[in-house]
Amino acid sequence: MEEARNRLRDEGYATMTIEITHRDGSKRWFEIASRAIRETYTGAVIEPSASHETLPQG
C-alpha cells in the first residue's frame, strides 16, 4: 500500500492488484487504478480518484 501511495504522489498514477478472501472462503482478485487530481498552480494533490475491476477467476 505504501508503495502505491508513493507512486500516486510522485508519478500521479498507481495500479494495485490484490487478492481478497470472501466470507464464503473463495478468493477474489481486484485491480485498483488510481490517479492524483492536482491543484493547478501548486501541483499539490487535492484528491485521489480510483476505479476498480473484479478480475476473472481461473
Image: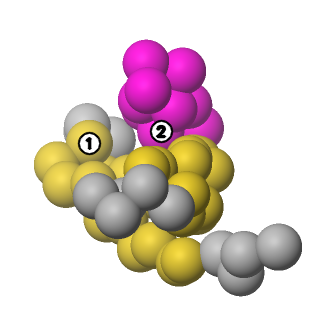
Whether residue 11 sits left or right of residue 22 in the image: it is right
Distance of label 1 from label 2 (alpha carbons): 9 Å
| Segment tinted magenta in the rendering | 1-13
Which numbered disc, 1 or 2, marks the residue closer to the eye? 2
Front residue (pair 25, 14): 25
Front residue (pair 49, 38): 49
Give the residue drawn at x 17%, y 49%.
Answer: 46
Whether residue 47 sits left or right of residue 11 in the image: it is left
Quarter the N terminus occupies: top left
**Whole-percent x, y for residue 23 in the image:** 28, 58
Please tell me how crowded label 2 is: few (under 14), some (14-19), or many (20+) other residues with Cα within 10 Å: many
**Whole-percent x, y for residue 28 in the image:** 54, 63
Name the residue that disc number 2 marks: 8
Front residue (pair 25, 42): 25
Give the mark, 1 or 2, whose residue is nearer the N terminus. 2
Amino acid identity at mark 2: Leu
